[in-house]
Amino acid sequence: MTDLSHPNPNSARPGDAADRFPKDCWYVAARSVEVGRALLKRTIACENLVLYRTEGGKAVAMIDMCPHRHAPLSLGKLVGDSIECGYHGITFDCEGRCVRVPGEERIPDHFRTKVYPLVEKWSFIWVWLGDPARADEALLPQDFRFQDDPEWCPMDDYIHVKANYRLVIDNLLDLSHEAFLHMGTIGNAAVADTPAVTTIKGDNIEVKRFMENCAPPKLFVRAGGFTTNIDRHQRIQFVPSSFVIIEVWATPTGKEEKGVIWWVLNALTPETERSTHYFWGLPRKFKLDDTELTDILRAGVTRTFREDCDMLEGQQRNIDRVPLEQRTIYTRSDQAPTRARSIIADMVEREAAAAGVRP
């Protein structure tokens, strides 16, 4: 039988765009509701994946490339729990084993395709693109657990951003922009006027801002019914390589009980060097059964993120012409975004050194 294998069909080549992203880390590949008994193609960190569920409901993430002629497996079809390539009918099971080559009886053991480590948890599907031996579920950002906590009301969604994922991380680590970009939803002057306290210890970044006796933003008024000034708290955490977790609470000024409390869970999955899969969750711990409030919050968050998206995409177009490194103004609020970029760069360098390639 002719050997259909490639010397190493699934490995990145030195200099590939894929080399410029961390791989030994978890990325959100999809919302759980997106993946079913149809083939879903998705590009993550310049790698093409195809996702589906087995007949038993287990999610699978496979490289979207048949190792025979490199045809996209997403152009094939599901046969039971296996993918049949739409080009020559070569079929791979959910573990990546070749189980059928039309016209040939013997299938060598090394006829396989790549299947990625996968965890389905907290309404999202997470994949690990790097060394499978390092894929530890304990490395998932644990604050996403509020999506499954019965004491919280979950919410999640997705937006596609035509900008590098590091720009989205920058945006979330410096929320002073809320005072100018999001005045119709979550912004007020206090966000820009109140200095943030940034703490950096190794790869841990935390940005805290406490806005005392400030006017409530419009979305806060609709969510919490505030009629007076509020005390507002933000705590932002960066979790390498692509997660920004924001804790938010607000209460009428001088009151101890928190009137509004939610988390903004941001998973910024790189698609290419100029595009990002932005998955988000917003679990809240008040008015859990208020479906009208859920609709209000979803509309407000969607509007806010669309405003971010428009700004980031414009920023990306400028950066394509003039690199960010050529900027001439730095502010105190740049501390956290700059450190996050260094952490990501260090991850890429360590992985490249271990693989013997240059990023």
Image (tube, rainbow, N blue to C red):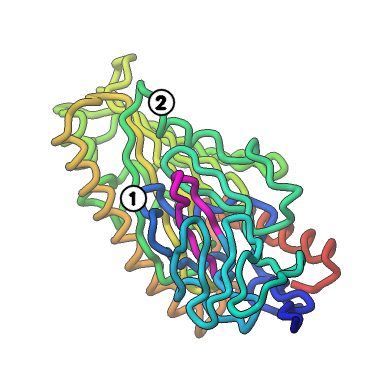
Mark 2–mark 1 distance (CA, rounded to whole Å) = 18 Å
What amino acid is at disc 2? Asp
Instruction: Tell me if I can see residue 247 in this picture.
Output: yes
Q: Which residue is mark 2?
A: 149
Residue 38 lies, in percent from the top left, at 38, 61
Residue 167 lies, with reference to residue 292, above or below; the image says: below
Residue 255 lies, in percent from the top left, at 29, 16
Report the magenta stretch's main SS. strand
Label 2: element kind: loop
Q: Quadrant of the N terminus?
A: bottom right
The stretch of residues the image draws in magenta is: 48-61
Instruction: Tell me if I can see residue 327 in this picture.
Output: no
Camera-side residue: 233 or 253?
233
Residue 154 lies, in percent from the top left, at 33, 35
What amino acid is at disc 1? Asp
Is 53 covered by the magenta stretch? yes
Camera-side residue: 237 or 349?
349
Question: Residue 275: which numbered mark, if any?
Answer: none
Question: Residue 157: which numbered mark, if any?
Answer: 1
